[in-house]
């Protein structure tokens, strides 16, 4: 079995990665870009800072705090979706 030369394929794989970065639905500003406005980003950062102790608590970090943060973010999500 003969393996292809790694140097000959590196240029193609880098190019395909670069193309993926800029493709329409690659996660770099795809369909849901409007949800993450500056206001939404600042709000979620503030919510995480305000709830730092709860995020690191074994009892609440897995579900309760994220449910609370999601509920607090819901008005912003609704604002930018509709």
Image (cartoon, grey):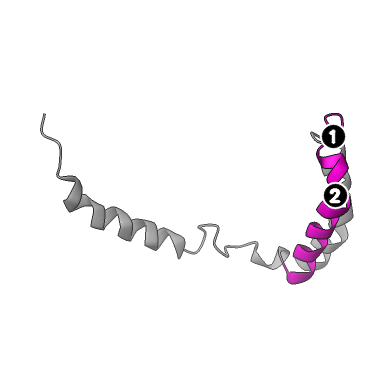
The residue that mark 2 highlights is: 69
| Label 2 Cα crowd, 10 Å radius (few <14 / some 14-19 / many 20+) | some
Q: Position of residue 70 (x, y in %)?
A: 83, 49
Q: Quadrant of residue 78?
A: bottom right
Farthest residue to the bottom: give it: 38
Secondary element type, mark 2 = helix
Q: Earlier in the sequence, mark 2 or mark 1?
A: 1
Q: Is residue 6 left or right of residue 27?
A: left
Foreground label between 2 and 1: 1
Q: Which residues are magenta?
A: 37-59
Residue 57 badge: 1
Question: Which residue is painted at 83% across and 59% down in the image?
Answer: 46
Quarter of the picture containing the N terminus is top left
| Residue at the image point whose x is 25% and y is 56% from the top | 12
Residue situated in front as seen by the camera: 78 or 48: 48
Q: Report whether residue 82 is seen.
A: no
73 up-or-down from 54: above or below: below
């Amino acid at each position: 079995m003969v393996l292809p030369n790694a140097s000959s394929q590196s240029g193609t794989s880098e190019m395909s990665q670069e193309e993926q970065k800029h493709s329409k639905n690659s996660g770099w500003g795809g369909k849901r870009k409007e949800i993450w406005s500056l206001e939404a980003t600042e709000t979620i950062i503030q919510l995480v800072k305000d709830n730092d102790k709860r995020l690191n608590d074994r009892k609440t970090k897995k579900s309760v705090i994220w449910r609370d943060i999601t509920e607090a973010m819901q008005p912003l999500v609704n604002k930018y979706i509709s």
